[in-house]
Image (cartoon, rainbow, N blue to C red):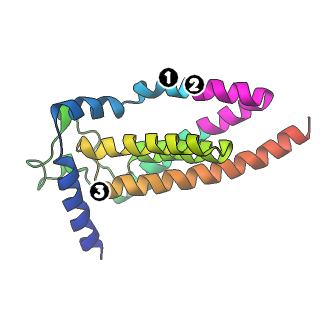
C-alpha cells in the first residue's frame, strides 16, 4: 500500500511540476515567500485588534503559538522522523524536476511546513471569524501557497496534503485552547 501511494504521489508530482512557464516560475517564487504576505498578516492583526480591542492580545498570542507549533511539529515530528527526501533531492527525479532558481531547501520534505503553517492559520481564523467569504479567501490563500511548493519542485503532493491536514488539526486544537483560555481570562475581569 505504501509503495502504491508513493508511486502515485511521484507520478502526480511529475505531472504538476511539469506544468510550468517563465511567468508562473516568477509568480510561484514570490507566492512561496513569507515576506510577500507580511501586509496580509498586518491587515489581519489590525482587524483583530480593531474587532476585539482588549481581547486581541490573547488572540494574537495564540496565533503566534499556533504558527510556532505547526512549524516545529512539521519539522521535529514529521521531517526528522520520516526523512522522506524532497523531490529535488531524490536521485531518480533530479533530472526531471523543474526547480525554480535552483533552490531546493532542506533535505527532507514530509510534511510541508508551508502547508502546515498556512492551513493552521486559515483554520484558526475561520473558527474565529465564521464568515464564509473570509473562509473562502483564507483557504484559497493556503491552497495557493501550498501548491507553490509542488510547482517549485520542493514537495510532493502528499507532503502538501498531509501538511495541510496537520495544520488544520493544529489550528482546531489551538482554537479550542484559545476559547478555554478566553473564558478563564475574561471571566475574571
Assess whether mark 1 and mark 2 are in contact (beta carbons under 8 angstroms). yes
Q: Is residue 44 left or right of residue 93?
A: right
Looking at the rendering, the stretch of residues picked out in magenta corresponds to 44-64
* Residue that badge 3 annotates: 84
Q: Residue drawn 53% across and 46% down?
A: 120
Q: Is residue 86 visible?
A: yes
Q: Is residue 166 left or right of residue 88?
A: right
Residue 16 sits inside the magenta stretch: no
User: Label 1: few (<14), some or many (≥20) within 10 Å?
Assistant: few
Residue 2 position by quadrant: bottom left
Q: Position of residue 152 (x, y in %)?
A: 24, 40
* Residue that badge 2 annotates: 43
On-image quarter of the C terminus = top right
58 or 146, which lies in front? Answer: 146
Q: Is residue 154 visible?
A: no
Assess whether mark 3 and mark 1 are in contact (beta carbons under 8 angstroms). no
Q: Residue drawn 63% across and 54% down?
A: 173
Q: Residue drawn 80% across and 27% down?
A: 54
On-image quarter of the N terminus = bottom left
Residue 151 position by quadrant: top left
User: Label 3: few (<14), some or many (≥20) within 10 Å?
Assistant: some
Q: Is residue 24 above or below residue 131?
A: above
Q: Which of the two discs, 1 and 3, labels the residue nearer the N terminus? A: 1
Q: Nearer the viewer, mark 1 or mark 3?
A: 1
The secondary structure that dominates the magenta segment is helix
Q: Which of the two discs, 3 and 2, labels the residue nearer the N terminus? A: 2
Picture disc at residue 95: none
Q: Nearer the viewer, mark 3 or mark 2?
A: 2
Picture disc at residue 39: 1
Q: In what element is the residue under mark 3?
A: loop
Assess whether mark 2 and mark 3 are in contact (beta carbons under 8 angstroms). no
Q: In what element is the residue under mark 2?
A: helix
Amino acid at each position: 500500500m505504501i509503495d502504491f501511494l508513493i508511486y502515485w504521489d511521484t507520478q502526480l508530482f511529475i505531472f504538476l511540476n511539469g506544468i510550468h512557464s517563465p511567468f508562473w516560475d516568477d509568480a510561484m517564487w514570490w507566492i512561496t515567500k513569507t515576506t510577500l504576505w507580511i501586509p496580509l498578516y498586518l491587515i489581519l492583526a489590525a482587524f483583530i485588534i480593531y474587532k476585539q480591542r482588549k481581547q486581541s492580545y490573547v488572540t494574537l498570542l495564540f496565533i503566534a503559538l499556533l504558527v510556532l507549533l505547526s512549524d516545529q511539529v512539521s519539522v521535529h515530528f514529521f521531517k526528522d522522523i520520516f526523512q522522506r527526501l524532497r523531490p529535488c533531492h531524490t536521485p531518480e527525479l533530479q533530472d526531471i524536476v523543474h526547480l525554480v532558481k535552483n533552490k531546493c531547501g532542506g533535505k527532507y520534505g514530509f510534511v510541508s511546513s508551508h502547508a502546515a503553517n498556512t492551513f493552521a492559520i486559515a483554520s484558526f481564523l475561520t473558527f474565529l471569524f465564521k464568515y464564509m467569504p473570509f473562509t473562502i479567501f483564507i483557504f484559497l490563500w493556503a491552497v495557493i501557497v501550498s501548491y507553490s511548493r509542488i510547482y517549485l519542485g520542493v514537495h510532493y503532493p502528499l507532503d502538501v496534503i498531509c501538511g495541510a491536514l496537520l495544520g488544520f488539526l493544529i489550528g482546531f486544537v489551538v482554537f479550542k485552547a484559545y476559547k478555554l483560555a478566553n473564558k478563564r481570562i475574561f471571566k475574571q475581569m
